[in-house]
Every structure is written in C-alpha cells, then in structure tokens.
Image (cartoon, helix red, strand yellow):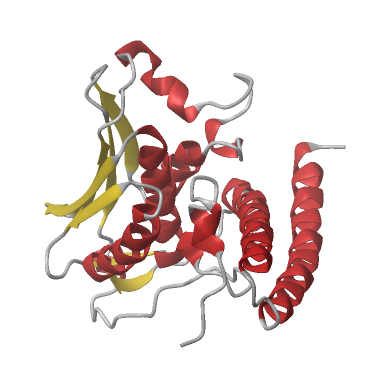
Amino acid sequence: MDLESLDRGAARTAGLLRMQLAQMTAASQLLEQTAADEKSRAQLAALDQSICRMLRIVGRMELTYRLGADAPRVEPAPVDLAKLARELGEEMGALLAGAGVELTVRCPQRLSACVDAGLIRQMLLELVSNGAKAGRRVSVTLTKKGDDASVTVEDDGPGIPPEKLEALFSGGGEDVPDWRRSGNGVAIARRIAALHGGRLVADATPGRGLDMVATIPLGLERAPDLLESPPVKWDEGGFSEALVGLSDLLPAAAFAPKEEK
C-alpha cells in the first residue's frame, strides 16, 4: 500500500473516531445535569479531559493529512491578525493561568492580512503550547515588518543547545518529511508557515528560554478590498478550540463542569 493510501486511511479513521467522541461528549453533557456532588464533578472533569486530549490527537491526524496532500488545502481570506491574536491570547491566557503559566500578548491595534485564519490559529496554539510546557512565562509578539507579519513566541524555560535546535522539527526517521510527523506540534507550525509562503525558525540560549519566530507574508495583493472574513474554527464537539489545543498540559480542574448560578 502506498503512502497516499495510508494517509487516506488515517483520515477516514480520524473521522470515525470523531463520531465516537461526539457521542461521548453528548453523554458527558447529559451527566453534567445530574452531577451534584464534588466526586461526580471530579469524575466528569477527568472524562472531559480525556475527550479533549483524544480530540487533539484526532485533529492532528486530520491536519497532517490536510497539510501533506499533493495539493494542500489552504483557504486564505482577509482577516485582522491582531484581533485574532488578542482573542486567542485571552482564551489561552485564562486557561494557562490554571496551570501556573503566565501568557502575555503584544500586538498592534490592527494588522490586516490575507491568510488561512484557522491554520494561523492552529500555529499559534502549537507554539504557545510548546512554550508553556517548557516555562512559566510565555509571550506572543506580533509585529509588521515590511510586507510580512512577524510572530515571536518566547518562553523562560531552560532553552536548547544551538546544535539541537533543528531537532525540534523532527519526530521520526530522516526519510520522513518533518511536517508529516503528527506528534510534533512545532513541525506542524513550520508547515503552516511554509504553506503561507513564510518560515518558522528557532533561536535559543541554554538557560535563557526558546524563541520561535514565524514570518508570514501578509498577502494583501490577494484581497485589495480588505473585507474581513470571520476566522475559520475547527469543530471540537462543543469544547473550545483552546481547551482542546492545550489539553495535554492543563490540569483536570480546567475541564470541570461549570456551576450554574
């Protein structure tokens, strides 16, 4: 069986898994209505945490197939990158605070671009998640440099020796392209940047954290009228995109059913 057939099979499997997870999510939501005591709520939190982590795995399977096709599906549309970064940053920041991580987002008032908003959000999620696993403070800085947008994600973790930086983007054998390794979120982020005509590089000093810098062409020539389109969001079965994207590092308490007022 050739590699393309294997990829299609994995994509179909991911779709079937998503259907089963949707049923589990519906059952969990029904149970929330009767979870009155602390023990029941803790058990539901653990269940929802597992569902979100499985949704994250399934989403990566689907995304890897989408980005690895002979004609990768990228759907650029006019969007305000600054607004996208602020809104996603607020959502991620509130969640990461529960894990003891401080997230700071710096960006201009507005930065128009023609990009695939869903993929850019996924890139930011992967880079912030990577930084939050290493340190207690993560910052996202968005700036305009000529005809490009520059996104820098910094953490205060232990850093990486310069000779090992490229290994960040590798999660398998040397004969497998790095963006196909679905277990490596940084490799996925680099592939997303590349599909927009940009690049993602890493810079680190041992003991001083890691900087991930993505450069993305604004692509304004594709949208001269700059009519803003709503950002594309993944269907995560009722859970927020950020909750699913950060589920592998958040505590179970982050998934607890919300108490009715």
User: Which quadrant of the view contains residue 165?
Assistant: top left
User: Which quadrant of the view contains residue 28?
Assistant: bottom right
Q: Residue at x 50, y 43 (%)?
A: 188
x and y, in percent, of residue 159 in the image? 30, 23
Residue 123 shows up from this direction: yes
Q: Which residue is drawn at 57% across and 50% down?
A: 67
Q: How many marks?
A: 0
Using the image as rendered, state which of residue 130 and residue 95 is in the foreground. Answer: 95
x and y, in percent, of residue 198 in the image? 33, 45
Q: Which residue is drawn at 44% across and 47% down?
A: 126
Residue 239 drawn above or below residue 188: below
Residue 74 shows up from this direction: no
x and y, in percent, of residue 251 in the image? 51, 50
x and y, in percent, of residue 172 in the image? 62, 24
Using the image as rendered, state which of residue 154 and residue 166 is in the foreground. Answer: 154
User: Which quadrant of the view contains residue 223?
Assistant: bottom left
Q: Residue furthest right?
A: 1
Q: In this view, does 124 lie to the left or right of 34?
A: left
Q: Is residue 4 left or right of residue 126?
A: right
Residue 238 drawn above or below residue 134: below
Q: In this view, does 254 lie to the left or right of 193?
A: right
Image quadrant containing the N terminus: top right
Residue 221 drawn above or below residue 101: below
Using the image as rendered, state which of residue 229 and residue 57 is in the foreground. Answer: 57
Q: Is residue 194 left or right of residue 38?
A: left
